[in-house]
Image (cartoon, coloured by chain):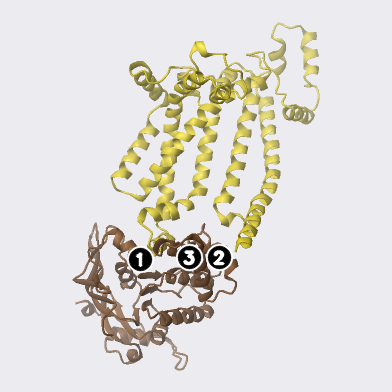
Amino acid sequence: MSDPLLSVRNLSVSYPGRTGITHALKEASFDLGRERLGIVGESGSGKSTMGRAILGLIPRPGIVSAERMDFMGSSLIGNSDRDWQRLRGRRISMIMQDPKYSLNPVKRIGDQIAETCRLHLGSSRKDAEKRALSMLEAVQIRNPDTVFTLYPHQLSGGMGQRVMIAMMLVAEPDLLIADEPTSALDVTVQNEVLRILDRLVRERGMGLLFISHNLTVVSSFCDRVLIMYGGRILEQCAARDLADAKHPYTRALIAAAPSLDHPKSELATLVRDPEWLK
Amino acid sequence: MERGAWRGWGQGLAAVIRPLIALAGSLLITFIGLTAVTFFIGRLTKIDPVLAVVGDKASREVYNNAYIALGLDRPVIVQYFLYLKRVVTGDLGVSVLTSQPVISDLLRVFPATFELATIAIIIGVLVGVPAGVLAGARKGRLADHIVRVTGLFGYSVPVFWLGLVGLFVFYGKLGWVSGTGRLDVFYEDIVTVRTGIILIDSAIEGEWDIFFNAFSHLILPAAILGYYSLAYIARMTRSFMIDQLAQEYVTTARVKGRSFWGAVWLHAFPNIMVPLITVIGLSYASLLEGALLTETVFAWPGLGLYITRALFNSDMNAVMGGTILIGTVFISINLFSDFLYRIFDPRLRTA
């Protein structure tokens, strides 16, 4: 990890509301190289907010502040709309949870993939279509010519998510954020999609920010793990050391997961300590 | 790839057309229902159809002959089928008020309404849709408030008041437009009536003076009617847009590198087409019914005025004829909307 792809210091996101300011993310700091970094935490812990802040997609009236947010040597803070548009899809992209909602229902699959090329690579229509087709092959879709002309409602969830991966990787970004990419899928296709994602990320030497609430998947799939709770990063550790995590929250999360080898009649529940947020 | 695309097109076309045949069947049933309702309402009124023909000074014998000639001695169901047969052949009876066949009356007044309604809906769509998209995309900001207040004004102001003020300002004071009626008196009855739509008839003959005169008569009432449909169309477009912009695929488009407005117009907008077509279709249909108040203020010889006058004079043939015409307009617009739905939403194409 010589020069980090992404370097974040004290990134905060807050939403002013009638009853005061809500801090969705508070003073998050981490570095990401060309590796897989897992982010785990329960719902509302700020995982997705972090992904969206890195893409500059925090909706109004959210406020993003950071001491430093450098991507490939240049700062993301103070980017203009145009700067962001050049970056998104081309350098950083994101796969979202459920292809049922994240694909445009009235546009053909092929056109949705080709759109990314047309936006960034200045490719001709024909060229973009060719790239889209080869990308469909790369995500192991058996008959890309047919799938190219289909609409999202004609695809299964697993296929939809592979299309999403194709769409987000076609312009060869350096960083991919995967926001719970398999949580909406059947367990049987989850592994398949993960394997494809794994291979493409490895082949292209990309950085991956893998957001999930599935501890098992994260610990087997990622190099390092960030544990988040209440908008903060509580702990960072190597994925293989997750079992020896020190923070009581992490230990409690691990304890709460059922294990086939040691069946228990009652699973542990989390006891939250306000001290963690101090 | 090329062949695949063409095959895709062929399948797409078949998928669009096949359900239309089924639709045609349901339309036929709707039309039979429409004529039945019209017919029985016509029978339920206290108006004596015989008196309407022979007048109240006719002798008993004349009355009885007319009664039989009109087929009123036969069972109601037989009468209905006779009526249906006449309707299908375009025979809607004679209007008591104008002494003309109702069908030729309708062919005279409907083009006037059609011309007015069409220009009005064009204004309503061309202004209302972009205004609604803008308001929805900039929800809660200045542009949104301007569109909402303008729309609210359109909802709240009575049309006859707006018509009179419009005439006073743009005709009386500024002289930008012509006054009431469809044409200035000295232009009347010059062009041959082909479609009854003066803008088209005069353009066919190359009578551009008449064309522009007709247009200057038309534009004010059309703009006022257009303003009302604009208010409705903009409000609905705004709420459709707000729904769609909250969808995840809009974020996807942004993540791919689309600008905000690129995502609005290229991704969200195609997704509001189906409900938008419904709204526009309904607005257009209600304009085609004839706008009584506007037609009254602008002395516009249209359908609304015709039917109202017929109703006040118990001219049942004219009322029933007009009702069938309006029903047919609604059915046609629904058919056309259904056809458009399938073009704009691939999910509706499966038969």
Q: How far apart are the two marked residues, 1 and 3, measured between alpha carbons?
A: 14 Å
Instruction: Give the vertical position of B190 relative to A252 (above or below).
Output: above
Q: Chain letter for brown, please.
A: A
In the picture, the disc for residue A113 is 3
Count of all numbered marks drawn on residues in the image: 3
Residue A133 in the image: x percent, y percent?
53, 69
Could one spot residue A202 in this view of the protein? Answer: yes
Q: Identify the image quadrant of residue B160.
A: top left
Q: How far apart are the two marked residues, 2 and 1, measured between alpha carbons?
A: 23 Å
Question: Mark 3 and mark 1 in contact (Cβ < 8 Å)?
Answer: no
Q: Identify which amino acid the numbered label 2 is placed on.
A: Phe
Q: Residue at x 78, y 9 (%)?
A: B62
Depth order, front residue of B236/B345: B345
**Mark 1 or mark 3, which has the lower sequence index?**
1
Instruction: Give the vertical position of B32 relative to A72 (above or below).
Output: above
Q: Is residue B253 left or right of residue B309?
A: left
What chain is tagged by disc 2?
A
The residue beneath circle 1 is: A88
What chain is tagged by disc 1?
A
